[in-house]
Amino acid sequence: GLYFTMILRPKVEMRDLPVVLQALGLAVADAVQMFTGLAVDLRWPNDVMVGERKLAGILAQWHDGAVLAGIGLNVGQADFEPELHAAATSLALETGSVQNRDVLLRAIAASVETHVKVLEGSGVQAILRLFGAASSYVAGKRVRVELSGGEVTGTTAGLTPEGFLILRRDDGTELTVTAGGVRPSEG
């Protein structure tokens, strides 16, 4: 795998951290697509997917005016533990070939730089539009969300101006999801 932390100092406010996370997801997705030709999806807020299987995850933390961006990408794994088989994948499994991690790291770093510049130059709404266009999870997807108080189900209904997910429950009420595991749901 390729697991690393980047220290970023974007010209944004701490309140924009959710959108920074989305910019990072876009950056990893774009680099993977350009590097491998794979079609990927973004699962709000921080997963890069191939189909329903996770290829990469991103975490971001604000620390002393900087963003610590942790990125983990499954590169060369030929197999996963049985409990992860249906949930995880790697570039090797998806492409059938070994990928050069050094070149991939440089491609991701360049893509992160580009997406941070988009965020700084064009603003939060530009990243939200790009993320919405790149993610099948943002609108119209039936999901279940694991929250601290339990699980809720509904259909995704877009993003708030702050980058949080809007979930329309079956009774028509809307819930703003600020954190939680989002997974596809049947029915």
Image: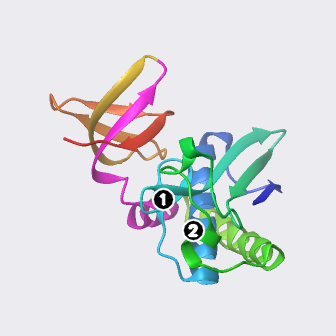
Image spot of residue 4 (x, y percent): 81, 56
Q: What quarter of the picture does the C terminus occupy?
A: top left
Circle 2 residue = 29
- Which picture quadrant has residue 23? bottom right
Image spot of residue 131 (x, y percent): 46, 61
Label 1 crowd (10 A; few <14 / some 14-19 / many >=20): many
Q: Is residue 127 left or right of residue 9?
A: left
Circle 1 residue = 42
Residue 141 painted magenta: yes
Would you say residue 118 is visible in this rendering?
no
Q: Residue at x 81, y 39 (%)?
A: 63
| Foreground residue among 150 and 167 | 150
Would you say residue 62 is visible in this rendering?
yes
Q: Residue at x 36, y 53 (%)?
A: 138
Q: Is residue 135 left or right of residue 27?
A: left
Q: Amino acid at mark 2?
A: Ala
Q: Residue at x 69, y 45 (%)?
A: 60
Task: Describe the element under mark 1 as helix, strand or loop.
Answer: strand
N-terminal label among 1 and 2: 2
Bounds of the magenta segment: 126-148
Q: Is residue 128 left or right of residue 36?
A: left
C-alpha distance separating marks 1 and 2: 7 Å
Image spot of residue 47 (x, y percent): 55, 53
